[in-house]
Amino acid sequence: MSDRIEIRFAGFGGQGIALMGRLVGEVISLHEKGKQSVMTQSYGPESRGGASSCDVVIDTQVIDYPKSTEFDYFVVMSEEAYHKYVPLLKKGGIMFVEENLVTLDDQAKKASKIFKLPATAIAESLGSRLYANIAMLGFVCANTDLFSEEAFIQVMKAKVRARFIEKNLTAFEKGKNHK
Amino acid sequence: MSDNKENTPMVNTGEYFTSGNLAVAEGSLAAGCKFFGGYPITPSSEVAEHMSIKLPQTKGHFVQFEDEIASIASILGASWGGWKSMTATSGPGYSLMLENIGLGIMTETPCVIVNVQRGGPSTGLPTLVGQQDIQQARWGSHGDYEIIALSPNSVQECFDLAITAFNLAEEYRVPVTILMDETIGHMSEKLIIPEKEKIKIVNRKKPTNEADGHLPYKADEDLIPPMAVAGEGYNVITTGLTHDERGYPALDADAQKILLTRLLDKIRKNKDKIIKLEEYMLDDSEFVIVSFGISSRAAKGAVNLARKKGLKVGYLRLITVWPFPDEQINQIAEKVKAIFITEINSGQVTREVKRAVEGKTEVHGLLKLGGAIHTPAEIVEEIERRTK
Amino acid sequence: MTEEEIGLIEAEEHPLDCYLRKGRIPHIWCPGCSLGSVATMIIEAIRETGIDPKNISVISGIGCTGRTAGYLNFDSFHTTHGRAIPFAIGLGLTDPNRKIIVISGDGDLASIGGNHLIHAARRNADITVICVNNFQYGMTGGQVGPTSYKGQVQTTAPYSNIEEPFNLPELIKACGATYVARWTALDVRRVKESFVEAINHKGFSFVEILGACPTTYGRRNQLREGIAILENFKERAVIEHGIDTEKVAIGKEGPIIVGRFVDIHDKPSLTDNLLSIQRMATASKGKGS
Ligand code: SF4
């Protein structure tokens, strides 16, 4: 079987959900040897305002089907997104949760591990809740083998505007060191 | 001046993680495209946006026109000015362009049209996937004609086929359509842009004879006339009316037969050179999935899944959708128990396959009507169900 | 009218002959039609500008006037109905030295192509648009059009036209055109001068020529001969350069105001603007995405 891994990032509009997928996708596609990735995102009414989501599929082989069907990782940043997508989490999958924005229920029990981060609070301590997505990615990086920190920082530096890099690096660091 | 007249390609060599829409734009730049006339429409707008950034950097022009009709007319004009030109749209815009695509066919004007398909008819599903413009690309303009249409199934192929599309347009003097879809257009994956020297570029044939007595529509052996453009002293003439070798209107059945036969044959007789297919596990297969574009990715996944279950399933992908590979499919039909087609429409390619197999095997469409793509598992399930 | 070719008496070698495509004459226009003389004025005007014929492109849409491009021995393009203007813009942008002349009829330019006409004026596209207005559709047999005046009788307005016509100079001026003029086909000297000005003009220039169509307009409106239409123009025409274009609407009766209404020189054209974008883009290359 292939080494296919599916990740879903979900939250609400304005949290930079698509950017999370794009960064992770790029890190894996361009910097993780022997791995490929595809990023797809929801467009349209679904992506305006309310819920926002995107998928990253990772494999060592050609990725035949670009969307996720049953995700191995579910990174969720809003209550609405949690309820909408948790049914699609694979049994034994791993969840990363913005703990102040998501109240878990019984459905979360199928996860083998749940990591909780006050991503928004961390971001606010840096001056803007806009850094919450990067804090969450630091947290994901520290608790999985999905991608390396060095590669991520390299990609982020190239993608993020110069004046925001410092704050984003700190956010990543804080997410990474959260226990 | 002179540098402005050349189709100097802009090749941004490197590795990227980017979307199909940006890749098709980059491929067009690498092919030497210098003019984009377009009108915004979801899910294709990123193509226009990217070209609006890049074209001015390569001394080309980007113009957002008042509608799709103006857009297609403008790119025909630019092509006659000697620039490689393109537009990008989606179903509703493509509908509006079709009359002038016909003008492009009649006047043998090289250009490229990207159609990032969404669900239809009408406004349909603006932000969701469809593959419903396949027959429209073939027959949508009035009159009889042959067309070339390509269908990429990855971000890399959006780039590669953009170059192929420009090359075919230039070689055969015909508008070429790239039939993308919302999913391919919006998904991101790795794109490798090779070095400039490694990219093969084809440019239109130029006349070598004197302007005096030049017959602009007298074809060579290959049925394609060399193309002089505006400003070269040939007093270019074009008309959408049926015309003779001089380009003068010739409104009778004989002239119509001569012209139309050549326009049809220049594609038909070169089918073997134009058609590109991808085969996978075909040799021993009892069942074959025929697919194209985004649906082909799930189809390939389905082949792998089916093989694991012991089902001998193979795969044929139409990289070139038009002209249609009748012979190749007919040959496959001789050897297999059934052909399945995965496509996101009500059976547009299925219909062609049925025609091509001439009853030699069973043909089943595994169809979705727009808004979602197939999964490998559901394809295998369907095959199992229908082959029991 | 039908597509049948109506022969004209062929003169001996004329100095303008080299600007006509041999083998395309006789043309299809009816006796008494103004289009032949408009075509002649275009050629004379081009000659007078001294522009290398290689750098002239003539583009037409569909209709009687739309046939003009095909008779002229320049780079000439006979396009689809209404679409001459965007075709011309694309063609023109590939070489700023190329002079682009669109010649088409009122139905082609102002009805089916109306959207392109107003936007080309708004963009100050570097093209000259010559609109021969014969108040209806000639080629298809005399149907009512957007320049038909109230009370005009045409095949699809058999009782009388109920709609108001476009006042083309007013429309085009409002959209931002930098040269707008109108003449009757009768006044060949001023028509030619105006064509010269329009061709030499930088940016969007628009010349409306009121033409005689005896075949499908005159017949139905008590102006049976071409000459009757022209005489009607002559009686009614008043030259008023620079007049407010609001005042130049044409009705069944009353004065027909002609002249050069707009002539502005300090507005950057579409080409100017695109070239300055190129300079901005080249300067920022490497910085942006
Ligand atoms: S129908 Fe009218 S406009 Fe057309 S050629 Fe005859 S007279 Fe001229």
Image (cartoon, rainbow, N blue to C red):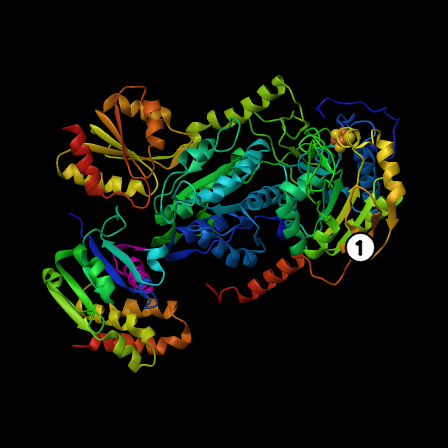
Q: Position of residue B362 (x, y in %)?
A: 25, 24
Depicted B185 relative to depicted C288: above or below? above
| Picture coordinates of residue C144, whole percent (x, y) | 69, 36
| Residue at the image point whose x is 65% and y is 56% from the top | C123
Displayed quadrant of residue B320: top left
Percent x, y for residue B121? 41, 40
> Left or right of B343: which side holds A59?
left
The chain under label 1 reads C
Confirm whether residue B194 shows in the render.
Answer: no
- The quarter of the rendered structure image containing the C terminus of chain B is top left
Q: Quadrant of residue A5?
A: bottom left
- Nearest the viewer among C35 and A25 is C35
Q: Would you name the residue on which mark 1 appears?
A: C261
Q: Regarding ligand 1, which quadrant of the image does it lie in? A: top right
For label 1, the SS is strand
Residue at 27%, 23% in the rendered image:
B333
Measuring from the top left, give residue B244's x and y in whole percent: 65, 24
Q: Is residue B189 left or right of residue C235?
A: left
- The magenta segment is A19-41
Is disc 1's CB within 8 Å of ligand 1?
no
Residue C184 drawn in magenta: no
- C22 is higher (above) or lower (below) than C194: above
Q: Residue at x 81, y 51 (%)?
A: C197
